[in-house]
Image (cartoon, rainbow, N blue to C red):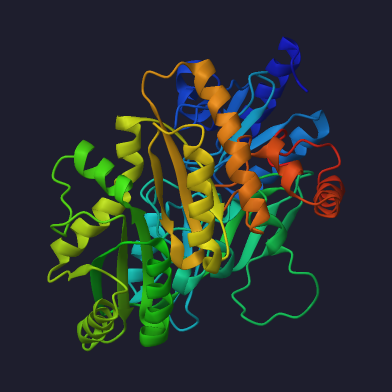
Amino acid sequence: MTQDPMKQKELTSRLLHIVGEDGVLVDPADQDFYVNDWLGKAHGRTVAVVRPRTTGEVSAVMRLCHQTHTPVVPQGGNTGMSGGATPDMSGAQVVLSLNRMKRIYDVDPINNTLTAEAGVILADIQKAAREVGRYFPLSLGAEGSCTIGGNLATNAGGTGVLRYGNTRELTLGLEAVLPDGRIWNGLRGLRKDNTGYDLKDLFIGSEGSLGIITGVVLKLFAAPAGRVTAWVGAQQLDQVVTLLSRLQSACGPRLSAFEMMSGPSLALVTRHLDAHVSPLEKVYPYYALIELADTRMGGLQDMLHTALSTAIEDDLIEDCVVAMSESQSLSMWKLREGISLAQVKAGKAVKHDIALPISSLATFTKEADQAVLSSFPDYPIINFGHIGDGNLHYNVLLPLEVTPDDYKTKTSVLNKRIHDLVAQFNGSISAEHGVGTLRRDELRRYKSSVEMDLMISIKRAIDPNQIMNPGKLL
């Protein structure tokens, strides 16, 4: 730990020598963006924000921090929701931001790969793929500001996991700088490489605790030429889950998204966000947003119409509407994407980013509702998520005027009830947002001792000085 002012001054001087004056931020006003998370919940201080431009500079910074035992907090776009990219309040940690490493090295439409630096914005990755007639399917609300390196470090999910998988499954190779400054170059665009341990999977989802991802080779796909979107209403969640299974059978890989939102979730959006209107006249306990996509233009709408008509005839769903234009489709997606902002306007949410077996979603929700309402009957439950991959955002909305102490107490109670139930269903307490500091202490409660020992052993082997993102994940 470099807390002594003289040592901090010497450290800053050596960092300036490595990355130049424009690469080191020491003024607290300049550091503000980097030491507070975007939710406004995690806050910290730092001796310096270091912004290297190349992998070589990252390597030199890490060698220095390794030699001086200076803790390092890697940071991408700083859009995380679990406090994983925020320094602590000691002021002794260095924030290493990748936001100046924005080069896209290569886009190969024949090999269907894209190679880029870790600081490239996700939306720019998507754009580069489109420009060569290809498609990169990772998509999430922060895509205009999150970086691909951060997406890998947290194994980001998003709306396309049902068809394409999460970030881990979209990654063929990566480059990482180890805590001692060594560079591992695994930037290989291979779909078959059976030469030992798959090292890239150690770094994907490690939340910066093992090293710093500096480059990546991503999978690209054929660009969809046609899309069709529908909105359905149902009485029960198990009906929505059954509809998912039916559509998977009827539409196969063309089913690219299947999102669920409860009635209270939709009501929250239409009440608090202007120009957000339900596509259906009647109110239902559950809704699903469905999207089919294909490389061919024709047939999708008929396919979806047929499947949904059969579902209505079988009393599986109550009503549906298929978007007849791009603007209608966008309006449907805005309802789903507006839930987070509507929660901020309506109250203070106790959030649970959980994953469960899809077959257990309805039973879990019934039991979770009972567990919450038995003690907190006046608090709305905002349940929505990517149920095509089993990821629920099961939130409980407390009033805006709740005191910080009361919020903390109720959060602790709700977390334990929900996460204990998740464990009973063999689920996960963090589906796509990461552990960070938010779930770190809970991890030991829900991970087996063997799992924890294995992770700690890997951490000690790669980061013996324990300087990589201390206090996060483990």
Q: Residue at x 59, y 49 (%)?
A: 430
Q: Nearer the viewer, residue 195 or 54?
A: 195
Question: Quick check: 389 above or below 270?
Answer: below
Locate the N terminus and report the quarter of the image it occupies: top right
Left or right of 129, for residue 179: right
Left or right of 7, for residue 135: left
Question: Quick check: 140 above or below 238?
Answer: above
Q: Residue at x 75, y 46 (%)?
A: 181
Question: Quick check: 200 above or below 398?
Answer: below
Q: How many marks?
A: 0
Q: Residue 315 in the image: state x and y as whole percent.
A: 28, 75
Q: Is residue 84 visible?
A: no
Q: Residue at x 52, y 69 (%)?
A: 165
Q: Nearer the viewer, residue 345 or 220?
A: 345
Q: Residue 81 in the image: state x and y as whole percent.
A: 50, 39
Q: Quadrant of residue 269?
A: top left
Q: Residue furthest top?
A: 5
Q: Nearer the viewer, residue 171 or 393?
A: 393
Locate the C terminus and report the quarter of the image it occupies: top right
Q: Residue 149 in the image: state x and y as whole percent.
A: 55, 52
Q: Quadrant of residue 195?
A: bottom right
Q: Residue 28 in the image: state x and y as whole percent.
A: 51, 17
Q: Is residue 44 visible?
A: yes
